[in-house]
Image: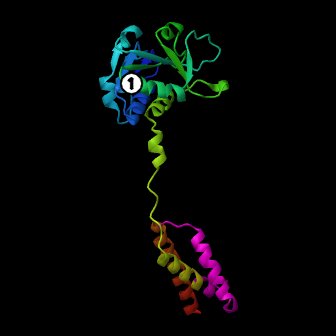
Amino acid sequence: MRIVLVSPRNPLNIGAAARAMSNFGFRNLRVVNPYEVAFREARSAVRAQHILDQAQNFENLAEAISDCALVVGTTAAVRRDLHVPLNRLEAAGAMIRKQLQSTPVALLFGSEKFGLSNEDMSHCHWLLRIPAREEHGSMNLGQAVAICLYELRRDESAAEKGFQPAKSVTGEDLERITGVLLELLERSGYVQERTSKSAELKLRRLVRRLGLPASDAETWLGMLRQVLWKVKQGVTAL
């Protein structure tokens, strides 16, 4: 995968693009006729300096994409006669991933001010568009690169697995919380002796509805015990 920035104007945006590439595991950055040649020193390339150091600089777009079998341009597609097919990013991502299995692909991003020119687009097999609202379709260069690369890296099968659920709290811990909370409420006067049994049942159900993970159970017990201790100390002082 070749990420090609055509006539970028701001070194910080080039650094942000390099950072996004590092975030999602892409390494091949190509820069065509940059406005500022000092982009390799951009501080915005947090922990991605290696990508800037290895970036290739080209005088024209034809040379930058000469080894690519598929060239895809990005555009906001607002009030322009594109002359080439346009796909939304979701569909484009799947098409690019499939092509990458066999041949190199170039993904083009235009300058911050004008985007890709008609001449730039003439090198593209097709274009993609990030589904931003038409009233504000253009995006910061670094953000656009990040969104496109996220879509290329996205793995629906991995997303279905999700994160490991938190360890569930045991019935013993829930009963300990219920007991401490009940004693605290009795000592504070919230629960009366004649209603203590029904209050205990309500508390037990309430504590279980909280859905506490095991990691939080000890924290709650610690807080409740401290409050109970303070309440006992106050009663002793009286």
Say if the magenta span includes residue 194. Answer: yes
The residue beneath circle 1 is 100
For label 1, the crowd category at 10 Å Cα-Cα, with few meaning under 14, some 14 to 19 and many 20 or more, is some
Visible residue check, residue 108: yes
Q: Residue at x 65, y 88 (%)?
A: 196
Residue 144 screen position, x and y as percent: 51, 27
Give the prevailing secondary structure in the magenta stretch.
Answer: helix
Q: Is residue 214 above or below residue 23?
A: below
Q: Is residue 192 above or below residue 98?
A: below
Quadrant of image for the N terminus:
top left
Q: Residue at x 45, y 52 (%)?
A: 163
User: Magenta part of the protein: which range?
Assistant: 184-213
Residue 35 screen position, x and y as percent: 43, 15
In the image shown, does 14 or 205 lie closer to the viewer?
A: 205
Q: Quadrant of residue 25?
A: top left
Q: Residue at x 65, y 79 (%)?
A: 202
Q: Is residue 25 left or right of residue 72?
A: left
Residue 110 screen position, x and y as percent: 49, 17
- What colour scheme does the image use? rainbow
Q: Please count the marks in the image.
A: 1
Q: Is residue 134 above or below residue 203?
A: above
Visible residue check, residue 60: no
Q: Quadrant of residue 181?
A: bottom right
In the image shown, does 155 or 35 lie closer to the viewer?
A: 155
Residue 118 screen position, x and y as percent: 53, 8
The residue tagged with tag 1: helix, strand or loop? Answer: helix
In the image shown, does 140 or 195 lie closer to the viewer?
A: 195
Could you tell me the amino acid type at mark 1?
Answer: Leu
Say if the magenta span includes residue 195. Answer: yes
Quadrant of image for the C terminus:
bottom right
Q: Residue at x 47, y 73 (%)?
A: 170
In the image shown, does 107 or 229 lie closer to the viewer?
A: 107
